[in-house]
Amino acid sequence: MSEQETNLLQFLRQCNFKKNNYNYLLTGVNGSEKFNLVREIIKAYFNDINDIGLDEPLSHPDVKYVSLPIYDKLSKRVGVLSDIDRLKFDYGFIDSLDSNKIGKEIVIDQIRELTDFLNLSSHFNHKFVIINTCDYLNREASAAILKTLEETNCKCVFFLIASELSKVSDTIISRCQRFNYKRNIISVDYKSYYDYYISTLPVELVNDEDVALSGLVSIEDDLSSLSEKNNPALFFSDKWAQFDKLLLDYLYGLFSLLLKGKYLSDDTKEVYKHLQHKIKIDNNKVISILKILLQKKSEFLNLNVNKKLFFDDLLIVINNEL
């Protein structure tokens, strides 16, 4: 049985769709698995449980999909991101689509539109609302979805997908039943942190020809050179400026692994030893760098930054700690 089939079976054991309302918060690592699971759940509802014979569940008028908004040149909302484009945006590979700008948050108007959707009579029985992902709900939208969860009278199943639970308000979490997507664990002997990191990325990104990941392979050597003071920090300026949020994610994972050290599982202990040999640093400095990276990730998400200056500053502060 595949990973997806296992999770689907587990979900359907929990939910028989006999009640009027369900609020589910789907958690797990960032990727398309949770969204694909929701598609399969809705497909099972229409086809297996109610024998309708639907090929594409998201096209059904009883299904509403909400994600990051897309704006045209006049700042008019013209659509929402597909799941694969959401992943590319999350990792910094795109910030626009066909000259249209991608919004950085799900806004309250998108949640208000759910009221109109829910007030219409359903074509069959339950309606379905998918929020992909609720990590991106701004404060006003978060308050509005909470009210919607509490006050919806029609038969509806809410699927709130989350990749970082810390970004979801406690009040929303308390109103939902959590379902954690379980991945199959495969033991692999990784030769480098780069190999390990690539294995953690969504397979859709790794297999996408338009997504360039190979540039990350030498970041370990850059950090090693900085720790040994072989080159000044800004020697790597142009190279690091070519990256985006992906590099911040890569570095945070790398220094997190260095901090965990002996507590790591067998398949990552060799990666730790490899990094420890290349990057000479004590735990106090690792913690300092992790704090810096958390701050930088927040700045990158919330500010319109000059990437060259941003990564120059990052190189300098990391170099000072190494």
Image (cartoon, grey):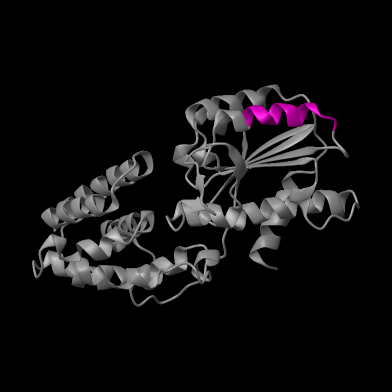
Magenta stretch prevailing secondary structure: helix
Asked if residue 114 is positioned above or below residue 284 in the image, the reply reads: above
Does the magenta-highlighted stretch encompass residue 187?
no
Asked if residue 57 is positioned above or below residue 203 in the image, the reply reads: above
Q: Which residues are magenta?
A: 111-121
Position in image of residue 64 (x %, y %): 71, 40
Please give the name of the residue rendered at 81% of the width and 48% of the height, measured from the top-left corner: 45
Does the magenta-highlighted stretch encompass residue 115?
yes
In the visual, does 279 lie left or right of 210? left
In the visual, does 107 lie left or right of 150? left
Position in image of residue 52 (x %, y %): 90, 51
> Where on the picture, by quarter, is residue 191?
bottom left
In this figure, what is the number of numbered marks? 0
In the visual, does 141 lie left or right of 251? right
Front residue (pair 43, 265): 43
Q: If the image is split into quadrants, where does the C terminus sit?
A: bottom left
> Where on the picture, by quarter, is residue 147?
top right
Asked if residue 142 is positioned above or below residue 178 in the image, the reply reads: above
Position in image of residue 43 (x %, y %): 79, 53
Front residue (pair 298, 30): 298
